[in-house]
Amino acid sequence: MKWMLVITFLVFCCFTLGQTLKCYSCTASISGYCVSNDRAEVYCGDSNQRCGTIKVSSRYYHAYTSFRCISSGCSQIFQIDPTTSVGVNITCCDTDMCNSGTVAAQLSLLPCAGILGVWLLSWA
């Protein structure tokens, strides 16, 4: 009976519960540092959204970067002002936190809890 509970718990822990894509969000970032007070990890509300990076720059300087969930306009480069060469570059990606600019190891809480549960039950 104990093993049936363990197996049921592990199966539950291995399923994702309909999570959407998790993205890094920051309205304004300069040189990799979020300068706005809204830095967060957010879940995109729509299954059509992707993690996006929006870079605003000119020929001579990089003004700022914005990170968020994006529905459309991925892989676009366009010029806002031809006289100053200010332009926008929008890129998107499809994996959790792929727009953060850093690689971070992330473990889901449910599989870790499952492993801990099995380990604790093996001692009982």
Image (cartoon, rainbow, N blue to C red):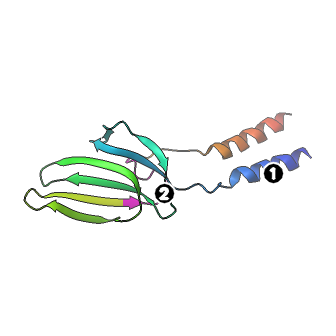
State the residue at coordinates (31%, 60%): 90
Residue 96 lies within the magenta run: yes
Seen as rendered, the residue at the extreme front is: 45
State the residue at coordinates (23%, 53%): 56
| Of callouts 1 and 2, the N-terminal one | 1
In percent of width and height, residue 18 lies at 62, 57
Number of residues whose C-alpha sits closer than 10 Å to that of mark 2, classed few (under 14), some (14–19) or many (20 or more):
few
Give the mark count: 2
In percent of width and height, residue 28 lies at 30, 44
Instruction: Provide the secondary structure element on which disc 2 rests.
Output: loop
- Give the labeled residue for mark 1: 8
Residue type at mark 2 is Thr
State the residue at coordinates (79%, 35%): 120
Looking at the image, residue 77 lies above or below residue 33: below
In percent of width and height, residue 62 lies at 20, 48
In percent of width and height, residue 5 lies at 85, 47
Instruction: Provide the secondary structure element on which disc 1 rests.
Output: helix
Quadrant occupied by the C terminus: top right
**Which disc number belongs to residue 124?**
none
State the residue at coordinates (25%, 46%): 64
Where does the magenta region start and end?
Answer: 92-102
Whether the residues at callouts 1 and 2 have beta carbons within 8 Å, the answer is no
Residue type at mark 1 is Thr
